[in-house]
Image (cartoon, rainbow, N blue to C red):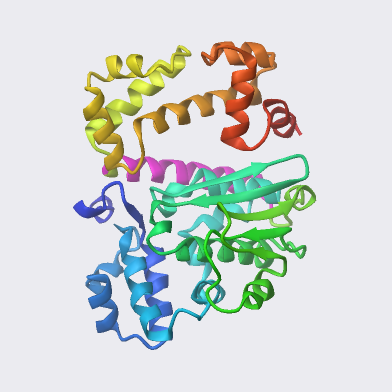
């Protein structure tokens, strides 16, 4: 089985679960593309879709959709149509964990926690304020495909919340980072809520009352089992997709973070890499050196706020901030909420 979990050399650090491409291929064929046309567009041998555990290069779905858009024209809302037709297997098995969560919030958090199972460069997070929570998504390829895959992801998530989690209340709003493909009414009809275009981000927003809803299919034992399964699978994928240098760099950041030291000089010293080499290693994985350090700092901040009763001033000191005001500003920039609001939400 292990030999099937291979990642093509050109997909290392830029891969996605095969279910995304398989779903794209099926949709393209339903819209009239032949298998030969799809293979030519994607530069992909369809036989490679036979391995259910494979990882494929991130640009394959984009190339298929680009060829499809040439066929149907730019005014067709392909993202909405694809999400409406897609089976939930496109989510690479995440549904099996989400449906056993205790609440809608727990289900969406499970999805964000396991986002790299879908695509290793996907940034997906649940950002909460006092009144609502937004599923925000970003992928480096958004600029290449004009956010088409992000649009499909938002629409498929909304379908899942409605059809599988059983939530009849529609989202508060949907924000898409690019202009509409086709009539705006098609989007409003699908999401059943206001839809904004050309926004700074992709976001699917629900009220706090929706996030708090208990799931009828909740099963703590099954949810714990699925969580452990995904954690193990992600470690296996990660071990194959990360270079030894990147693993060394990440461990150096983790070691420095454990002492509350997030200085670049400390990380470089522990990693035994030059700054330039460390930057190249991070870039090959679709991130930046400073982004990795900031991510570790944010994770440490969230853990301290969630798991301790330490005053905000103490948390700021432990994280190496000059004062609590600097920490509050940084935390609000990272999460969209204040440290106090995050702590209250985590303790509810």
Q: Residue at 75%, 30% (x, y): give it.
A: 344
Q: Which residues are magenta?
A: 218-240
Classify residue 238 as left or right of residue 294. left
Q: How many marks?
A: 0
Asked whether 292 or 343 is in front, the reply is 292
Classify residue 330 as left or right of residue 347. left
Asked whether 215 or 118 is in front, the reply is 118
Asked whether 107 or 322 is in front, the reply is 322
Q: Is residue 101 visible?
A: no
Q: Where is residue 148 shown, x and y percent of the image?
A: 46, 66
In the rendered image, the vertical position of residue 220 relative to residue 11, given as above or below: above
Q: Residue at 59%, 19% (x, y): give it.
A: 326
In the rendered image, the vertical position of residue 288 relative to residue 132, given as above or below: above
Q: Where is residue 259 shown, x and y percent of the image?
A: 45, 11
On the image, which quarter does residue 306 sit in? top right
Identify the main secondary structure in magenta.
helix
Asked if residue 74 is among those painted magenta in the image, a careful observer would answer no
Q: Is residue 316 visible?
A: yes
Which corner quadrant holds the N terminus? bottom left
Q: Where is residue 4 shown, x and y percent of the image?
A: 26, 56
Q: Residue at 67%, 16% (x, y): give it.
A: 312
Classify residue 172 as left or right of residue 225. right
On the image, which quarter does residue 145 sit in? bottom left
Q: Where is residue 2 shown, x and y percent of the image?
A: 27, 50
């Amino acid at each position: 089985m292990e030999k099937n979990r291979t990642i093509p050399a050109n997909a290392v650090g830029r891969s996605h679960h095969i279910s995304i491409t398989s779903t794209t291929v099926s949709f393209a064929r339903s819209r009239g593309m032949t298998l030969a046309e799809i293979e030519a567009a994607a530069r992909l041998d369809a036989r490679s879709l036979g391995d259910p555990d494979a990882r494929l290069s991130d640009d394959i779905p984009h190339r298929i959709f680009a060829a499809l858009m040439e066929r149907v024209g730019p005014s067709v809302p392909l993202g909405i149509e694809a999400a409406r037709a897609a089976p939930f297997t496109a989510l690479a098995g995440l549904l099996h964990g989400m449906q056993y969560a205790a609440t809608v919030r727990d289900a969406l958090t499970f999805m964000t926690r396991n986002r790299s199972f879908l695509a290793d460069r996907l940034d997906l997070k649940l950002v909460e304020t006092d009144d609502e929570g937004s599923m925000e998504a970003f992928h480096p390829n958004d600029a290449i495909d004009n956010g088409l895959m992000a649009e499909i992801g938002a629409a498929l998530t909304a379908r899942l919340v409605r059809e599988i989690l059983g939530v009849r209340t529609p989202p508060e709003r949907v924000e898409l980072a690019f202009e509409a493909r086709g009539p705006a009414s098609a989007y409003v009809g699908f999401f059943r809520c206001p839809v904004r275009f050309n926004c700074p981000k992709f976001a699917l927003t629900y009220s706090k009352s929706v996030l708090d809803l208990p799931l009828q299919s909740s099963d703590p034992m099954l949810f714990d089992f699925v969580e452990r399964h995904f954690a193990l699978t992600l470690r296996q994928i990660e071990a194959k997709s990360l270079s030894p240098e990147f693993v060394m760099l990440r461990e150096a950041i983790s070691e420095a973070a454990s002492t509350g030291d997030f200085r670049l000089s400390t990380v470089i010293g522990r990693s035994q890499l030059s700054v330039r080499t460390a930057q190249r290693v991070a870039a090959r994985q679709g991130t930046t050196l400073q982004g990795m350090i900031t991510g570790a700092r944010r994770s440490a901040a969230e853990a301290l706020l969630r798991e301790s009763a330490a005053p905000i001033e103490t948390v700021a000191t432990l994280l190496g901030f000059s004062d609590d005001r600097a920490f509050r500003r940084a935390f609000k920039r990272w999460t969209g909420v204040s440290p106090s609001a995050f702590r209250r939400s985590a303790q509810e």
